[in-house]
Amino acid sequence: MKNAIERLQRYKALHKILKNSPQATEDKPLVKASVDAMALNNEQLTALISDLSRPGSAIVAPRVQYRRDFKELMYKATDLGVLVASKAEDATLLMLVKTYRNRIQGARFYSIYEMAVHLSAELNRYPELLTAFEAAELMTTLQAKIDNFDLIADEITLSFNERKVKRDQLGVLLKSNTRLLRNDLDRFVALQEVAFPDLYASFRRLRRPRPAQHTNGSADLGDSDISGTVTDALTGLPVAGATVTLVQHGSVINADEDGYYLFDELTTGDYTIGCFAPGYQVPEQAEVNIETDETSLVIDFSLTQAKGVEG
């Protein structure tokens, strides 16, 4: 997001320079159309960046609270499970209940749900004992948690999908401004060096290419980009902080809290994208080719949890 904010600030500054020199664009409808198009893009970019700058953690807050409540309920359910298993002399159930109780504290969202479904089914095999222990209310509450799980999970997934759509729109608008500048406005301003030297100097100063951030020392900047999201293969939710590497440039970035990453200003050529996140198996690297300028490639990573890690 920092990159998008910096680019928007440059676009706004460039637009201001052009608007402050109306005499240079008067009687030039095509140029004015490009200037107006940049202004519209900037307005839309401002709105999108404002929305996307809001922390994604707010989206998962209901899930965090739901899991916390679910855990407290599961502790009570396992207490009940011990009573039922002991009274029924069911050694297998007793072992299962104790295993689940030990896993509750470190369990993730989906693991809590899976344990609850299994435990509920096992306890319901002993309706007489549940009645004897006056556990009807507890079992009803547990079942309600199980039934509401899909709704909570779907709402979170929908919210993250909406953010992904906005990120895609953000990329389209940034690229649109880049095209307007390189294909239209840069060329127009270059022709104004003599007639409007102040406009030319101010505009060119802002348009001076920024140094490349690649460790191989390359100063070449292109118009292409590679982006994507890193998600958990089981839950479909973002893997925040996942490390994504662009091997050819030696560039390493971390996916944001939406699991989103972006390598921009790339030139044509072959690229290798790798991904890593603690607690997950390392996926195969993606081999891609950028054939022409202004190419946008989307490479998503779906990570599988490493063995022994709770899902």
Image: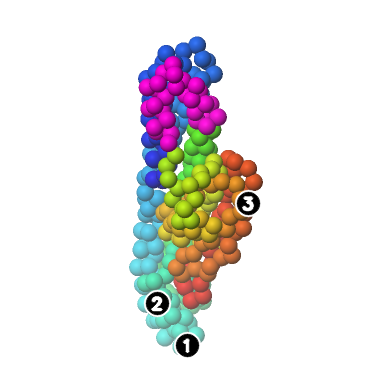
- Res 221 visible: yes
Q: Which residue is mark 2?
A: 101
Q: Of the two numbered discs 2 and 1 on the same chain, state the one appearing first in sequence.
A: 1
> What residue occupies the far top of the structure in this picture?
27
- Residues shaded magenta: 180-208
Mark 3 falls on what kind of element?
strand
Look at label 1 and name its amino acid: Ala
Q: Of the two numbered discs 3 and 2 on the same chain, state the one appearing first in sequence.
A: 2
Disc 1 to disc 3, how far (Cα)? 59 Å
Look at label 3 and name its amino acid: Asn
153 vs 97: above or below: above
Rendered image: mark on residue 91: 1
Of residues 154 and 169, the one nearer the viewer is: 169
- Determine the main secondary structure of the stretch shown in magenta: helix
Answer with left or right where residue 231 lies relative to residue 104.
right
3 vs 77: above or below: above
Q: Which residue is mark 3?
A: 289
Q: Nearer the viewer, mark 1 or mark 3?
A: 3
18 vs 252: above or below: above
Disc 3 to disc 2, how far (Cα)? 50 Å
- Crowdedness of circle 1 by 10 Å Cα count: few (<14), some, many (20+)? few
- Crowdedness of circle 2 by 10 Å Cα count: few (<14), some, many (20+)? some
Q: Are marks 1 and 3 in contact (CB under 8 Å)?
A: no
Pinpoint residue 91: horizontal percent, then vertical percent.
Answer: 47, 87
Pinpoint residue 282: horizontal percent, then vertical percent.
Answer: 53, 68
Q: Nearer the viewer, mark 3 or mark 2?
A: 3
At horizontal 50% and vertical 35% (from top left) the residue drawn is: 178
